[in-house]
Image: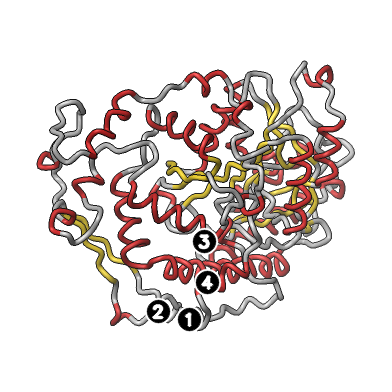
Amino acid sequence: MGSGGTLYRLNAESLSREGCTLKAAFKHLQKADVISLGGGLPLSEYFPFEAMEHGVLPLDNLNENKDASKGSIGLHSTKTDMVSGRSIYDLTVALNYSQGSGSAQLLRWITEHAELVHNPPYEDWQCNMTIGNTSALDMALRMFVQRGDYVLSDDYTFSSAVETALPMGARFLGVEMDTEGMLPQSLHDTLQNWDPAAHDGARKPFLLYSIPTGQNPTGATQSLQRRKDIYRVAQEHDLIILEDDPYYFLQMDRFYGDAKPSQFDAGSQSPESLLSMIIPSYLSMDTDGRVMRMDSFSKIVSPGLRLGWVTASQQLVERYKIHADVSTQGPSGFSQLALFKLLDEHWGHSGFFSWLLHLRQQYSHRRTFLVKACERHLPKDIVSWAVAEAGMFQWLKVDWRKHPDAASKSMTEIEEEIWFEGIGQGVLVARGSWFQATENKLYTDIFYRVTFAAAPLDKIEEAVVRFGEALRKIFKLQ
């Protein structure tokens, strides 16, 4: 197909975008002797912020037994860092308007990172900053879908993705899953046997939405072979893969049932060893330029930064940037500058990998702690699970057929009854029905999504105790 072969999939809205006239004129400011009276870029002397400083933990002080004497490391920015030669990026630039691609300084670091981790196997790929994966997906769908289209996904998928597509007139269609996520054969069968008449006249789907690592909500992680098999189906049926992968670096150590935390030591492992531990992405095997990958700092640095990036062929990224120029523009200048100081000037790529190794250890421990709590406190004759290998979520299956009123109550009624009883016991979990991809499909099982990321460990234990009590009460097991 070639790296530009997906352009014919763009819808009329995306093809009709001609870019932002005002931003296009910025290129002339590269000439040193040009005085600009053409743009609305205010002078930085009218920005009330003169300096920015934030402290970060030393990478060699991340253990639970932190050395208080080490304190934090201060990262400092002012308006004059560029003029004085102290930095290539400062508040004067960060707090003004920029391109929809984000600042050139941070974008360079992000592109280097993408090459180190994924190294897309074609030449004309690019990155473009986003304000997070939800916005990136919204814009990607706006580029491709027409009213009446279907988007293929896992049978259970991120509810916000479904809710983003619906107002555009697009519906999600779930593909059968197992503990690794989407089944390649089911994906192939869905496409091979597509009948527009059975789907309100909709054309054969060409968009595949995938969360391949630590899938939200099920926690499923696709193996390398599973990804290769799905990519081959995508090639056979000419699909574009929207690879939504915010949990990619939250791939965890194998579950051995030992909840004892290990101590992180930044010097005990080569930071680059992380790359040998993680499953290659769809982007890394994309010889055709059919993958549009969405990454985010939300799960690995901070959600409030509202900063991520897309990686795709140059042609697709250019369409995305043209859209961003007149909608989201770039992420917050404060966020971009804070990340640049941390990632480029302080950590570098090696330091960032050390941080990610630390997160891997922490989330491995948290996952194990939650699973052991489930083993201790949930009634295992009605609750089962496959241990999550990545991400933030554990997916619990409840055998509703053992409910004393299963013959007279619907599955949905029982799911709601359990959920409200959980709230009554003082625990909030997410109902599996919220994540059903296919509208008006008869789903036959009850699931709940719980997270091991959002509470201290003692609170996680107490929450599991409470959910166990709710289940025992509803199922009359006490």
The amino acid type, in three-letter code, at marker 3 is Leu
Q: Is residue 205 left or right of residue 116?
A: right
363, 43: nearer the viewer:
43
- Under circle 1, the secondary element is loop
Q: Earlier in the sequence, mark 4 or mark 3?
A: 3
The residue tagged 3 is 116
Instruction: Give the Cα separation between the discs numbered 2 and 1.
Output: 7 Å
Name the mark on residue 60: 2
Query: How dense is the environment of label 2, judged by Cα within 10 Å: few (below 14), some, or many (20 and up)?
Result: some
Instruction: Give the Cα separation between the discs numbered 2 and 4.
Output: 16 Å
The residue tagged 4 is 272
CB under 8 Å between discs 2 and 1: yes
Which quadrant of the figure has residue 384?
bottom right
- Under circle 2, the secondary element is loop
Query: How dense is the environment of label 3, judged by Cα within 10 Å: few (below 14), some, or many (20 and up)?
Result: few
Name the mark on residue 265: 1
269, 448: nearer the viewer:
269
- Under circle 4, the secondary element is helix
Above or below 36: residue 471: below
| Residue lying at 63% horizontally and 34% vertically, measured from the top left | 5
Instruction: Give the Cα separation between the discs numbered 1 and 3.
Output: 23 Å
Where is residue 423? Give x, y as percent.
60, 48
Question: How many callouts does the rendering have?
Answer: 4
Q: Is residue 457 left or right of residue 470?
A: left
Instruction: Give the Cα separation between the discs numbered 2 and 3.
Output: 23 Å
Where is residue 68? Give x, y as percent.
31, 80
Front tag of 4 and 3: 3
The amino acid type, in three-letter code, at marker 2 is Asp
